[in-house]
Amino acid sequence: MLRFIHTADLHIGRNFTRFPEGVAVRLRAARVGAIERLGESAQTLGVRHVLIAGDMFDAAYVPAEDRRQAAAAMAEFPGIQWWIIPGNHDPAAAPVWDAWRAAPPPNTTLLETAAPVEMEPGVWLLPAPLSGAQQPGDPTRVLEGMATPEGSVRIALAHGSVGSFGSTADPNAIDTRRLARLGCSYVALGDWHGQKEVAEGVLYAGTPEPDGFGAQGRALVVDVDGIRSTHQSLESGQFSWHSSESVLLPDMVATDAARVVAEARPEGRARTALWRWRPTGRISPQGQAALQSAFAEAAPDFLHAQADWSGVLPLYSAADAAAMAPEGALRMGVEALMAQASAGTNPAAHRALSLLASVLKETI
Amino acid sequence: MQIISVSVRGVRQFADRTAHITGFSAGLCVWAAPNERGKSTVVDALVAVFLRDRKSTAADIRALVPHSGGSPEITVNFLHKGVVWTLFKRYLRNPSAEVRDAAGALVAQGDAAEAWLSQEFPHAALAVDLLWARQGALAMEPEGSGPVEKRQREEGRESRRGLLSAASAALDAGLGGPRFDAVRARLASELAELRTPTGRARTGGSLDKAQKRFQCAQKALAEAAAMKDRADAAVATRAHARVAQAEAEARFSQAMKDAEVAQHDSTRLAQEVDAARCSFAPLSGAISALEDASAKRETALSNHHRRVQAQQAHECARADIAKLQREQEGLDLRLNKAEADLCSAQESFNIADRQMERAKQALLSAQAGALNRRIREYRDVPTPSATLQACAQWEAEIARFDALNEVHEGILAEAVWEGIEPPAGWVAGEAHVLRDGDVLVVGRGRFVVRSPGGTERLEQRERLHLRLLEHQKETGFVTPADLRAALEKAREAAIQISVLEQERVSRFADVVPSDVSPEKALAVLEDARYGADQAREHLAALHQAVAVIRRERDTMERRMLSVQGALNTAGAVLDALPESVGDLGAIEATYTAAQDKAAQARAAYRLVEDREAALAEAQMRLNAALQVVEDVRPVRDAARERRADADGVARMVAEGDPDTVFRAAQHEFEIVQSDLSRWEQEAEALGLAIQALDNARAARKMDLFEPARLQMEPLVQAVFGQATARFGTDSLLPNGLARGGVSEDASVLSGGTRDLLHILGRLAFAQVLKARGIDWPVLLDDSFAQIDEDRIKALGALLEGQSSYQIVALSGRITTLKEWTSTHIEHTVLV
């Protein structure tokens, strides 16, 4: 029986420019850190092989430090053989592999030729590397002609998306019917960032370190026994990404804000978590202010927390208008802007009202 | 407030005199006086005393000072809240202000008086601006497009905004007041920092800077994207080059392999060809030996076969000849007999033929005899003596007789009556209508009434009857039909006789007729003919039989000759062939051995041919494979070069770290875009806030305008008939007139019409202000200069009707205004 770890889509070198610099740096480092965590898991589980089904690097051109750190991380686990195929983000023609080829870590094998390779005696790896970012046709078609000694265990390694049944018009689209004809004990796929079992023995491992809200960092531990294989999920992410939504009720008052935020925040260790919150609904300006304040109070607990307030519409009352302007044309103007802001028909109305309110305060 | 009287001293022409103006009343009061009487001076003084602080040194205060200098003093008695008050102010030197009640008690003075005025009349400026038409300021809007006029109009608008704002407390606090203006100004100021009035970003402002940063970032992003695209393209090109090179290398390798295989095959096959040729060489003579042996064998066998055949042929020929001779004898016998039968048949035929001829003759005689008999029969046909003509006549007479006979048959009596009416007592019986209108009446009895023509007819009938009898007697026929038939028959007989005579001449001229009937003669002839035919047929058959026998005999003779020839030929062959053909067995054995050897030689030769063909094919394959190698080599080399180039380009592009640059540019672009969006939203929000305030104020203003417009409508119609005044949005006064379906702007109206509109506008505002608790008089200083007489009168009637507020009309048109009302202001000047 052979046990190995199946992973893919590490996307080493990805820049998280939409996040504050400190957060982006840590997220980027976590991509390389995934190699370390996988290596440690492999040692713990007694696994000697790690299969990376494409997109190890995020782009064809990746800064040297990312590449070298990845290589160094792999080299730290000499008892583990890392089998790598190029994906669409880091195809075989990508310059990122030039330096890799020049000085590859000794315990790595870059499978950039579509030819069977013997992993272990009697166990053959059938790689389907991508030479370009958008390779026409099904990348697994090269596997059909791969002959291995009779009775050997065959494991396929490919990168692409599972197209619609029979459709191979999109580049890198894999036809599942072809996979079924390969006679493989296991087909290790990459490209989708979530774990997914396409068919028996045909799986996407997902990404070991999540890179978007709602994603999870996982790999697969696969056991192959002859023609059969079993698998189990392996948690490998350093950070967790959470996304939550809350529906706000119009009767929400300022004192409810802390409770609302507490109910919305994710559980678990916050300092390694990224949280995106989307509240929606109509509440009073005071309530919104309290909510924003409560969120701002909770945010520092997280590695990164962001709230999308675009779904929160203000609900003004007559008292709000009276508080801003006593009567007359000013009052009428305030009321007109409040109506627009409450209706949500003009996004600028809320800001206009804020401006008017601040000037009114100054002119009292 | 209602003005009761005004006194001025030290004001313009009243430098050292006091002018008392009295006679003001509620409703319309008129001060009609010639020019230069001080009407406008008094108006200016009123404006000053109500609007200007006593300490003011504004231009309009200084304008009140006479040429000789001095301090203007103004006193106004007015009715306010039911109380008569006296207001006194002195300007410039020793300024002072006093307010006294009706009893003359001092109510306030100095600043207190000013405060009292502000408190009691907080809207004085508004009211004066709206309701007092001062001389030279008939149109509140300065006309003209020059910068001065524009500035004056703008200042007027700003002034009114300020006035309107100041009247917020009185005008239901609807227009916002100074705070409104301050807020709006602040917002406008912030917006102006971002945008120009035309909506463009103000140069150097935050929005402008954000736009510029955005453009820079956009450009940088485009450049980074282009660089990344080039990098991606380089990677793609490199990928293609790698694939192409791999394919080219594979093709080249395959071509080399194919060439090697072809070369190996050629070499091997060449060796095989040599080996086959070596195997064939010793056997090369076997074929010719076989040919010799075969020839000898053929010759021996042929001779032997020929001898046998010749002997057989000779014997057969002899047997055939004997047979033929026997057959010939038989044929001769048959022929003799057939000829004898033929002679006999000929004799029989001759006899039958003669009999037939005789029968023919007999038939002719019978026919001739029959012909003669027919002629005799025709000749026996009697020929009437009468002619057809007589017959026709007879027939005509019969017809006449028949016609008359119809009458005759009806006659029963011979009595003759004269006339045509039967006598009395007679019953008419049959009435016969004769031709030609004659009526013959036959009655009971024996009387006949005849018409005058009837008797004649009877006589005619009788004559005809007799005539008819004569015809019968003469012709011997009873009826003319019989006669006609006999005549016809005789004619026919004559014709037949003629025909038969001709036939006898033509056919039977030399024939002796007989009495035998033609039928019997014909029957005899038929029998004779039949006999002749039979004899002929028999004779023909015998002729044919003889001919057949003769042909057989001829055939027999030819066969005899042929067989004789064959016999001779066989004999000649036998004579020509040698007596012995040798040892056939030995010849056969030699031949068999030669055959075996030849077979071996052929097999060996086929092997040589086969190997040579294979060698030729292998050489062709080798040539083709070598050609493929030469064709693919440059392709491979080119693929290597392209791969190297692509590698070089990709490495070179990679040095620029295009992904990082692109992401950084993208990030920067997003930041700048967000910033720009924020400033744009800020500007939009400011504009929205200003717009909301303007809309609110416009709504409130309309709240004021609408009542004024409503107030003005009846006034306009009272003066102009079916017409409507038009208000603009930035002026409180009408700016146009719509009448007769045509809307005219104030600028195109006549001066008098404009003045009228403005007067009516002030009246309307007076009502509106009054409704809102601002009671202020309307003052029209010399406002009627351009108005025609008819309109003046109408206006006067209108003003007379406005009794709820005071209207003071000042004009030099004394005659016209004196007709308006009886309330006239008096003007007294005291030293």
Image (tube, coloured by chain):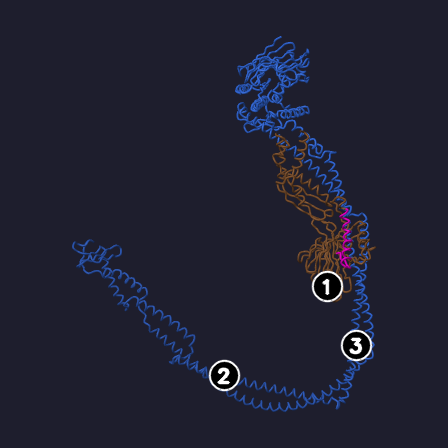
Chain colours: A brown, B blue
Work out which quarter of the rendered image holds the N terminus of chain B and state it: top right
Asked if the magenta segment contains residue B98, the reply would be no
Q: Which residues are magenta?
A: A25-52
Between the C-alphas of marks 2 and 1, the distance is 121 Å
| Residue A38 colored in magenta in the image | yes
Name the chain letter of the residue that bears numbered label 2: B
What residue is disc 2 on?
Answer: B536
- List the residue tagged with mark 3: B605
Say how many tags the image has: 3
Q: Is residue B266 left or right of residue B132?
A: right
Q: Which residue is mark 1?
A: A225
Instruction: Give left or right: position of B417 versus A35.
Output: left
Horizontal arrangement in the rendering, residue B706 relative to residue A175 (left or right) = left
- What amino acid type should be assigned to the residue bearing mark 2? Arg
From the viewer's perspective, tell me whether residue B600 is left or right of residue B467. Answer: right
Residue B64, by quadrant, is top right
Which image quadrant is residue B339 in? Answer: bottom right
Nearest the viewer among B51 and A257 is A257
Label 1 neighbour load within 10 Å: few <14, some 14-19, many 20+: few
Query: Can residue B619 be spotted in the picture?
Result: yes
Q: Quadrant of residue B96?
A: top right
